Image: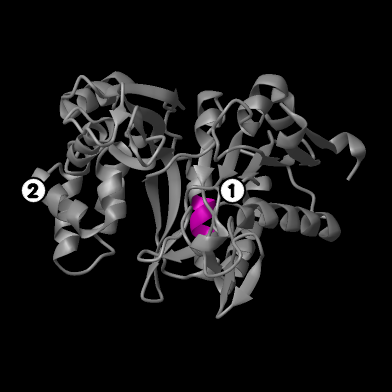
Amino acid sequence: FADSDIFVGGAIPKKANLVVRYRGTGAARPILLLAHTDVVEAKREDWSTDPFQFIEKDGYFYGRGTGDDKAQAAVWIANLIRYKREGFKPDRDIIVALTADEEGGGPFNGIDWLIKNHRDLIDAELALNEGGWGESSGGKKISNDLQVSEKYVINFRFEVRNKGGHSSIPVADNAIYHLAGALQRLSQFNFPLKTNEVTAAYFRQMSKIETGPIAADMAKVADGSQEAMQKVAAAAPAWNAMLRTTCVATELEGGHAKNALPQLAAASINCRVLPEDSVEYVQSTLQKLVADDQVAITHTNEMGKGPASAMRPDLLNAVKRATDMLWPGVPVVPIMVMGATDGRYLRVAGIPTYGIQGFFFDREDIRFHGRDERMGVQSFYEGQTFLYELVKMLAKNTK
């Protein structure tokens, strides 16, 4: 690759991004292939292996980032090299962008920085990203999910401050107790169940794939039945997260000495918010729920919501063709991902973005951000082949 087609840079030296352009004929606008190279923190004492040592055992690749998102980053680069070696002549430029700080979501977020400072490097007709993976259960592939929308993130802080005092003279007005009461109420609360255009389409299609009573319930969910939503939400945490905004405590801090009453107790609350729910709605709901004027509730950051990407027939047809090549009969299902990705930044900037990977994960064993994160070895290589074929199809599209 020519030096002029390779860019390395970012907001700070430790948050660099890599952008590489593979030149096509220019008959169509570029396609952007996005992945992030940063990962969520992992502690050795929490894992059965070293989280930052790449290990293959028992048919799996283990290590932090194997699923989120180093596998896709590796595939984009490996496949780009393969196209180059084969002399592939696409009708559009293929741009690979590997970005920094996606997980932190802070001021050094890579794709946000590129959009603001180097839009020309990544400007494209469409982008492929993480956020859509294959669902399997008991070794059977159920669906190859195509992410077209996503929740957005708001982080809140519950904070209680108190004058404290000597622990030998306890009082009821204890910062930790106030916080504990707020968290207990949060643990027992659920936001309302609802569907939107994308999730209704997901459950309608899944009702034709699933078996047993849950299939009928899914069909009713697509039609707006609250009773059916309750049943489906109770059946699986992932379905529950698709059907409502969620808020969960993720970090705790408090106290300053074993023999002193706490002067501070605080918790981080991570909310994954449906696109149709506002920041104001979520915060006011939490304040009513907590109902304690000693607990201050502030939002520490928010990503903001983005629009859904249109279901382009050319993209959907290509995904179906590539899926049928590897896994005949496995349907392609549009989804709203329960988490959040850098696709939001691109959608807001006017670049339709689709989460698609072809890596299959067991529904009951999703380990992103968790202990002993892993990906099946066969799943990884099948996903690489799937993405190789998919990008070739889209790169030859001159619509």
In the depicted view, which residue is nearer to us: 281 or 51? Answer: 51
Q: Residue furthest front?
A: 168
**Highlighted magenta segment, given as a residue range:** 317-321
> Picture coordinates of residue 129 (x, y %)?
56, 45
- The amino acid marked with disc number 1 is Val
Left or right of 58 in this view: 266: left
> Picture coordinates of residue 361 (x, y %)?
45, 64
In the depicted view, which residue is nearer to us: 11 or 157? Answer: 157
In this view, 83 is above or below 285: below
In this view, 265 is above or below 79: above
Residue 373 seen by the camera:
no
Query: Label for residue 120?
Result: none
In the depicted view, which residue is nearer to us: 157 or 283? Answer: 157
Left or right of 84 in this view: 189: left
- Looking at the rendered image, the disc whose residue lies closer to the viewer, 2 or 1, is 1
Q: Residue furthest right?
A: 2
In this view, 46 is above or below 349: below
> Picture coordinates of residue 386 (x, y %)?
59, 62
- The amino acid marked with disc number 2 is Glu
Residue 279 lies in the magenta-colored region: no
Q: Residue under label 1, please give it.
A: 39
Q: Residue under label 2, please give it.
A: 227
